[in-house]
Amino acid sequence: MTFGEILYIFVTLLAMVNPVEAAAAFATLTEGRSSEAQATIARRATVVSFGILVIFGFLGEELLQALGVSIPAFEIAGGLLLLRVGFNMVFAEKTDSETADTAKVTAAQAADPSVFPLAIPIITGPGALTASVTLVSQARDQWLAYGVLVVCAVVVFAITWGSMRGSEWLTKVLGRTGVDATGRIVGILVAAIAVQIIINGVTGLGLIHGR
């Protein structure tokens, strides 16, 4: 694999997971809890979200084949979904911080937010799941590519865990405005990735129909 391909995988996963927004949501959901409780929640949320992303990424294609859905068709549908996610991030229709605010109001303080809503859908949402399946399908049974994908995911989730552990400092430095601005910038990147995935899907459909 080339450095450009590795960078593409890393940046795609980093944009989908968005550690800064995850940190802001974590700070909201764990406000008032002890340091030990926050550490446990951050660790559990990271492990659960990582497991879901990797498992869905490697089993998603099998599920699609069972449903009779081709990978190019999924890339187009997934690209459109990611495009919508990118638009929502750019125009701040509903940020992860706002999702966390809502969850905090509706859930009891004693409830553990590590799985829901932190791991799902804040850290590993529809966009991240779609991207994982697409990236695995693009690897085309190359074990090196699979390994690179898993390593990139480990690094991204390590960054996410670190962001959550340092969420108090991070949100204090950036402020709500800085977090929202970062979300908008990442949203532009997500939209660009989505368009490229759609283009790849359209190209793939053309090759299939041209056989």
Image (cartoon, helix red, strand yellow):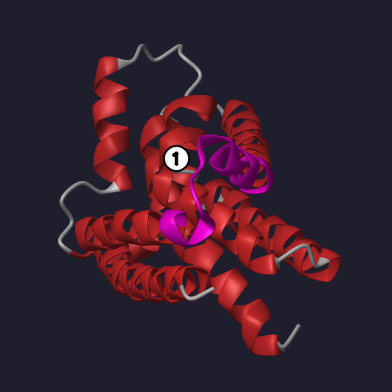
Please provide the residue range marked out in magenta. 56-74
The part of the image, by quadrant, that contains residue 28 is: top left
State whether residue 169 appears in this view: no
Q: Specify the farthest residue to the right.
A: 143
Residue shown at 71%/63% (left/top)?
149
Q: Position of residue 207 (x, y in %)?
A: 50, 75
Quadrant of image for the N terminus: bottom right
Q: Residue furthest front?
A: 211
Q: Give the prevailing secondary structure in the magenta stretch.
A: helix
Observer-nearest of 114 and 87: 87
Badge 1 local density, few (<14 within 10 Å), some, or many (20+)? many
The quadrant of the image that shows the C terminus is bottom right
Q: Residue 120 in the image: x percent, y percent?
A: 47, 34
Relative to 68, residue 171 above or below:
below
Classify 207 as above or below 90.
Answer: below
Q: Amino acid at mark 1?
A: Phe
Residue at 48% across, 46% down: 69
Indicate left or right for 84 with 142 as reference: left
**Residue that appears at 71% across and 56% down:** 154
Residue 180: quarter of image:
bottom left
Drawn side of residue 4 relative to residue 129, left or right: right
